[in-house]
Image: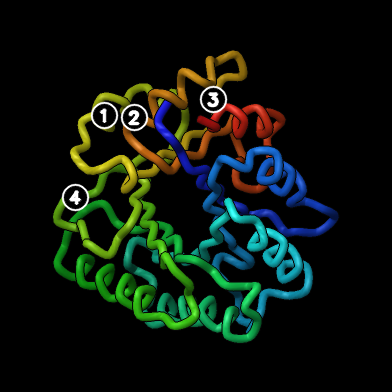
Amino acid sequence: MHPVTVLLPLYIYPAFNAWEPLSKAVSLNSDTNFSVIINPASGPGEAATPGTEYTNAIRKLNEAPNVQTVGYVRTGYTERNIDDVLRDIATYSRWSQLDGSLAMSGIFFDETPHDYSPQQKAYLTTINQAVKDSNGIQQPKLIIHNPGTIPDARLNDPLTDVTVVFESSFDQYQESDEALQSLSGDRSSYSIMVHSVPSGENIRKVLRSMSRTAEYLFLTTAGEGYYEHFSDSWDKLVKNMGS
């Protein structure tokens, strides 16, 4: 299997050791890299910092050498006011200026478009540049776009590091596998996120197939709330992502 990075949407409030399954997986799988999407309030929230419980949990994650944290920003398929998007980027940037242990290493732009228009292209270019120009977002300033499907090639931007080219169920993934395998870019520039994987499925075989196309992977047996809790198979899935 090709080397992979776990791309984890961590949309879980970090109370009562709720992030402990992640901390355990990070520690036990030190040869596996994790890119963890931090999402306090469908974005960074209005406050200067995300609150004590988030602050403590993010600090702990950022101490791990195999973890990169990236901030969640919703774009609403470019219908969200771009000033609000830029404000979210600036808020994440200020986290590290207030407390270096809270530094994000990039931004995960959710709900990016897959259809092309010049206006959408300009919107994406502007927000990408804001991340790369940010003083508070630390290197590598990873930019991830999530259209959830293969986007129009005219939306490609050299500043976009990773594109989520699939985000849906396992059944849908099987139907889309041929199109995904035909992508011409380097696998390091793609992500695949699959939910509702049958519990009896050969996980290693599925991951091997996914890793031929994409480096950044998320896989879960959960059929709902898959970003809001860790599935019973979480430990097994992460272990199988190791090389």
Looking at the image, residue 69 sits to the left or right of residue 118; the answer is: right
Q: CA distance from mark 4 to mark 2?
A: 21 Å
Q: CA distance from mark 3 to mark 1?
A: 19 Å
Q: Give me the residue at 31% from left, 26% from top.
A: 177
Across and down, in percent, residue 105 comes to 49, 66
Reading the image, the residue beneath label 4 is 152
Badge 3 element: loop
Mark 4: give few (<14), some (14-19) or many (20+) Cα within 10 Å. few
Relative to 125, say whether 169 is above or below. Answer: above
Which circle, 4 or 1, is nearer the viewer?
1
Q: Are marks 3 and 2 in contact (CB under 8 Å)?
A: no
Residue type indicated by callout 4 = Asp
Mark 2: give few (<14), some (14-19) or many (20+) Cα within 10 Å. some
Q: Which mark is residue 197?
A: 3
Q: Are marks 4 and 1 in contact (CB under 8 Å)?
A: no
Q: Are marks 1 and 2 in contact (CB under 8 Å)?
A: yes
Residue type indicated by callout 1 = Gln
Q: Are marks 4 and 3 in contact (CB under 8 Å)?
A: no
Q: Give me the residue at 65% from left, 27% from top.
A: 236
Task: Of the two numbered discs 1 and 2 on the same chain, state the one appearing first in sequence.
Answer: 1
Mark 3: give few (<14), some (14-19) or many (20+) Cα within 10 Å. some
Q: Give me the residue at 68% from left, 41% from top.
A: 25
Reading the image, the residue beneath label 2 is 212
Reading the image, the residue beneath label 1 is 181
Image quadrant of residue 104? bottom right
* Number of numbered labels in the structure image: 4
Across and down, in percent, residue 168 comes to 44, 36
Badge 2 element: helix
Residue type indicated by callout 3 = Val
Which circle, 3 or 1, is nearer the viewer?
1
